[in-house]
Image: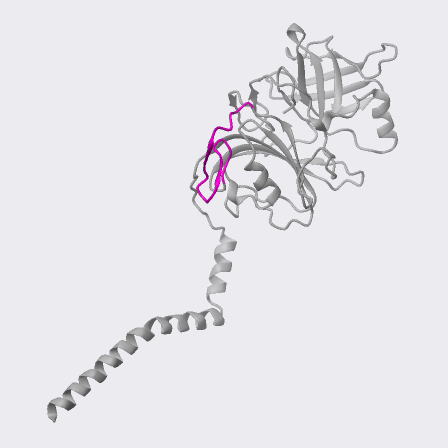
Amino acid sequence: MWATTGQILVASCASRGDPRFLRQIFRPLASVSHKHGRGIKVSAIGLTELPNVASDPALSSIGLQNRMGLRLPLPRRVALQFEGPASSLQILEASLCNAQGKCMMIEVLGVSSDGLVELQETDAKGDDTTWRVCNSSLSSLPEGTCVRLYDTTPYVEAPPTATGADGMKNLRLQASEADPGNFAYNGVGGVQLEGYPREIDGINCTFTVWACTDSSGCCRVVEDGEDSEALVCEFGPKGIKEGLKSMLPGETRRFWIPAEITDRRFGRPPPDRYLPVGSLVVDMTLHSITREAVFTYNMSDEAAKFSTERELQPGRLLLRAIGVGVQFLPLAWYLQQQQQQQQAGDTLGLM
């Protein structure tokens, strides 16, 4: 998810997780094998820079303690920037488990070994934003590594760099290395670059849903998941649908969904998946596109019962009877005309 030259790892606080949800959040363009639970393997790709949401100053122990003193929540997600092999910058995505004094604990998912990593602020004079790894079993983040932390948790208000209208803002978090290709007929009128999803296409995506109900404006994760059979036309919020149609495989975008949006379909044919109510932020990574996808519509028991009850309403039965009668009117008129012609012919014959 986070842009720099190096690796992508996925981290989350153990206290937040529900094992029913997929732990994987963002998968890069390189090959990814995934499964439910904690055993997610993520292959790395090279990226270039921190996302716009991490443009604030690096976090310090004083800043974190001030937030706790003001009863403000700690960052739900942070980007740890550090120097890797050959002096290349790398990024690790993480969530804070706790922060006390000059110490911090995070937990990294997607690794087979213990993902807990302990950080301690360095005592360098004039530098209170550099942290040193003092306890880690991860080869990607060995002990002694110096890192800087940036808050990447979304807020209910979109930053000035976000684009969009009517409250449906979005912000690109990760660029794509895919080629948009040439212009091609999009199947439903008009033309567009052939590398983008169309209204009639299916997509394979991973996502994180944030609820923004905190009085401080900070959002919290309510679900991490994936959908390998989503349909572009089944995304209700216009901001998400239009945003997807301008994304290339490998790109990640963050969408702000206002509370007043009523159509909250989320990719699967109904009634499979909907977004929760309220103000939301949705992070989505597009991985691949299935052209002109088809699907099987499975009606729920509640929907089938409602449909049967509606069909048995007196008004609908009357309309159905009128419809049947209207269908037979031309035939009845034709038979009547034939009978009248036959009677006229018989009368002439008798004369």
Residue at left offset 23%, top offset 84%: 340
Residue at left offset 20%, top offset 83%: 341
Q: Is residue 70 visible?
A: yes
Residue at left offset 60%, top offset 40%: 240
Please identify the quarter of the rendering in which residue 149 is found: top right
Q: Is residue 198 above or below residue 37?
A: below
Q: Please, what is the dominant secondary structure of the magenta stretch?
A: loop
Please identify the quarter of the rendering in which residue 3 is found: top right
Q: Which residues are magenta?
A: 177-198
Give x and y (percent) for residue 197.
Answer: 50, 36
Please identify the quarter of the rendering in which residue 128 is found: top right
Give x and y (percent) for residue 164.
Answer: 66, 40
Q: How is the image coloured?
A: one colour
Q: Is residue 107 above or below residue 345?
A: above
Residue at left offset 64%, top offset 44%: 276
Closer to the camera, 266 or 306? 266
Give x and y (percent) for residue 285.
Answer: 58, 30
